[in-house]
Amino acid sequence: MDSVNPKRILVVGAGHVGLYAALRLSKKLKSREAEVIVVDPQPHMTYQPFLPEASAGNISPRHAVVPLRRELRRCKVLAGTVTRIDHDRKTALVQPISGPTREVRYDHVVVAPGSVSRTLPIPGLHEHGIGFKTIGEAIFLRNHVLDRLDVAAATTDPEVRRRALTFVFVGGGYAGIEALAEMEDMARDALRYYPELKPEDMRWVLVEATQRVLPEVDRDMGAYTVQQLLKRNMDIRLDTRLESCVDGIVKLSDGDSFPTDTIVWTAGVKPSPMLDATNFPRDERRRVTCLPTLQIVDGDRVVEGAWSAGDCAAVPDLTKEPGNYCSPSAQHAVRQAARMADNIVNVVRGREPVNYKHKHAGSVASLGLHKGVAQVYGVKMTGWPAWFMHRTYHMSRIPSVNRKVRVVVDWTLAFFLKREVVALGQLHDPREEFAEASQPVSTR
């Protein structure tokens, strides 16, 4: 261990893996041992399991994100984007949010840029689709849905109303199911203020390419989820693909076609394209290849000083047969981050790294207020107990006491106060009104 020249650890990305790893490294390593630098274009980490709750107005959007500089006080936070990693030279090029590109040298690099939405070349999707992976997308969707209620209530044209009140969600994984259920719950709650509209006027459509939803749980739990959604008069299309949505006209593989103003895409993720700017080995799914120790590996050769985990990494799952990899879930990401940080500490201090091994504990999902489904260590729950477990688990997992307290306060107030159902659409284009008012007056 070199006490004169501390090791420099560069953490690329401040999602679940990056934040937890940096936080643990900064606590376990003394300043004379290592300096931890975190690079991310956003000033916060988004706790993605809370996106549906934030979108539905159950918690404040600010409480679903964790400020980096508040949590990582012993780290150096650099607001910018890594545009190139040359591990042969152990350098990274960083483009700050403003100013010239910087070169950052390191001894160890944690490659954790996470994932982005995995889209398909579907005509019209680029122009009309809405993602559900960031806090901005979640709040945009909330404002958009409430705005569509206003449009429907104000119009006298039945076609305009039908289009405005048709909401399509593509993808039946956890993100899609929770987003659909929470948004329908919110919209139904909002209708009490719209005497012009009835719940049956709304049409909520789920499009899933496979024959089941929630593949992370047993089939009976997926079937229960579908039954609950059907009881709420939702239109569930299994074994169906979205083939086109040009001009907002949804065309499905089952031959159905209808207009809509809302198409939410939640059909999976893929590794961040930032990995294309590195010279690290990748597998056929473009993930960084790793050992169970979370060290990056090129064939049989360990890439010294390079580590990865989370959605962008192919990490062998030692609890299953050889050839299986850990799923891209927050559950694995948080635990991999802790194991990886401890392994980096081991290497810095001259010890051997330890394999990551975690048997998937199960999954929990919210289906709206007081409704849920859970399968944890083989125990299956539905309804209120599952919903309560969902909230308890994620409250325990979000970093920092500050955020835990604020989320609990939000939930507590929701028991006594009605849900806020006002759209703040001007947030998405705040200069529009001023730009119109400040246009030069023509003298001609």
Image (spheres, rainbow, N blue to C red):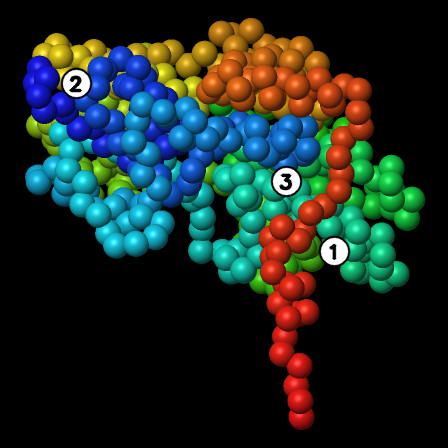
Closer to the camera, 388 or 424? 424
Left or right of 69: which side holds 435?
right
Of pointers 1 and 3, the one earlier in the residue sequence: 1
Label 2 SS: loop
Closer to the camera, 3 or 244? 3
Closer to the camera, 411 or 4? 4
Mark 1 near mark 3, Cβ–Cβ under 8 Å?
Answer: no
Label 1 SS: helix
Q: Residue 32 carries which label?
A: 2
Mark 2 near mark 1, Cβ–Cβ under 8 Å?
Answer: no
Q: Position of residue 397 (x, y in %)?
A: 48, 17
Q: Position of residue 131 (x, y in %)?
A: 53, 45
For disc 3, the marked residue is 206
Label 3 SS: strand
**Residue 114 visible, this angle:** yes
- Classify 296 as above or below 321: below
For disc 1, the marked residue is 163
Left or right of 132: which side holds 155?
right
